[in-house]
């Protein structure tokens, strides 16, 4: 139990680092929360700071998710967890880092939407093949629809089903991955409303006036 609590705390704190805001303030002299959609994630970073700044945000957010996953393995080894318990620890890391990113305490619990950090951690939690499937779902739908949010929400909804595949029989691990995935979907509720209203911005749209 202590190992699981420690894993959540470490993953949450790693996930909570608002790299989008850090980069926008240090290198661009602006507050990303006051630009475009106001979100601190990759999509708004690209639109507000260009490709260099935006991709830097993606790499760092992806990286903190990946690091969260590796930290869960380190904690599992430190506490001598068995294979089943280690799976649970990696699932908790996924849950923790996504919640840390979405509910970052440094920004009054208002953070990003969690896709980059989530997929980063999934490379440890799920392994390479299921994570590539997640990326493929995201990429294909973005290309077909020109909506980043559609790919993001579909990837989030796919997470519980992939968790069933990877962790079949390990229900706590499935549960924690489901919580994380559905929270990412919930974070896109505003995008869903705009999609239904026909007001969502497509990839390549100019800056909103």
Image: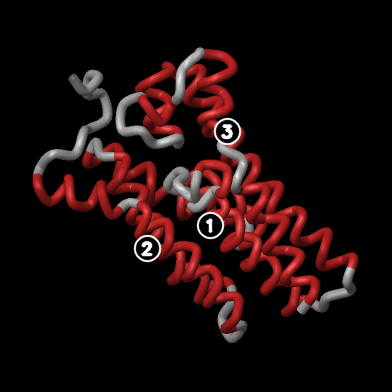
Label 1 close to label 3 by CB (< 8 Å): no
Estimate the spatial distance between the alpha carbons at disc 2 and disc 1, rounded to whole Å.
16 Å
- Compared to residue 164, the image places residue 110 above or below, namely above
Q: Tag 1's secondary structure? A: helix
Q: Quadrant of residue 60?
A: top right
Report whether 18 appears left or right of 190.
right
**Residue positioned 56% across, 49% down in the render:** 105
The figure's colour scheme reads: secondary structure
Find residue 157 and name its label: 2
Circle nearer the N terminus (2, 3): 3
Number of other residues with Cα within 10 Å of mark 3, as a class: few under 14, some 14 to 19, many 20 or more? many
Number of other residues with Cα within 10 Å of mark 2, as a class: few under 14, some 14 to 19, many 20 or more? some
Find residue 112 and name its label: none
Estimate the spatial distance between the alpha carbons at disc 2 and disc 3, rounded to whole Å.
25 Å
Report whether 9 appears left or right of 164.
right
Residue at far front of view: 108
- Compared to residue 156, the image places residue 16 above or below, namely above
- Compared to residue 25, the image places residue 41 above or below, namely below
Q: Is residue 132 visible?
A: no
Q: Position of residue 176 (x, y in %)?
A: 55, 72
Circle nearer the N terminus (2, 1): 1
Residue identifier under label 3: 19
Tally of numbered discs: 3
Number of other residues with Cα within 10 Å of mark 1, as a class: few under 14, some 14 to 19, many 20 or more? many
- Compared to residue 15, the image places residue 5 above or below, namely below
Q: Position of residue 72 (x, y in %)?
A: 75, 61
Frontmost of labels 2 and 1 is: 1
Estimate the spatial distance between the alpha carbons at disc 1 and disc 3, rounded to whole Å.
15 Å
Q: Position of residue 9 (x, y in %)?
A: 70, 60
Circle nearer the N terminus (1, 3): 3
**Residue positioned 52% across, 29% down in the render:** 21
Find residue 99 and name its label: 1
């Amino acid at each position: 139990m202590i190992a699981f609590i420690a894993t959540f705390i470490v993953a949450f704190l790693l996930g909570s680092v608002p790299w989008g805001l850090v980069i926008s303030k240090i290198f661009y002299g602006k507050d990303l929360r006051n630009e475009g959609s106001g979100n601190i994630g990759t999509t708004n970073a690209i639109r507000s700071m260009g490709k260099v700044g935006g991709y830097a945000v993606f790499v760092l957010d992806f990286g903190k998710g990946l690091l969260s996953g590796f930290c869960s393995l380190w904690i599992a080894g430190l506490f001598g967890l068995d294979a089943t318990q280690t799976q649970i620890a990696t699932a908790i890391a996924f849950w923790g880092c996504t919640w840390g990113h979405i509910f970052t305490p440094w920004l009054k619990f208002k953070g990003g939407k969690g896709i980059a950090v989530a997929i980063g951690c999934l490379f440890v939690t799920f392994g390479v093949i299921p994570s590539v499937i997640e990326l493929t779902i995201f990429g294909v739908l973005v290309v077909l629809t020109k909506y980043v949010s559609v790919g993001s929400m579909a990837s989030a909804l796919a997470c519980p089903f992939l968790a069933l595949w990877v962790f079949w029989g390990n229900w706590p691990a499935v549960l924690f991955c489901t919580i994380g995935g559905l929270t990412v979907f919930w974070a896109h509720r505003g995008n869903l409303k705009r999609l239904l209203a026909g007001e969502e911005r497509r990839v390549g749209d100019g800056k909103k006036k």
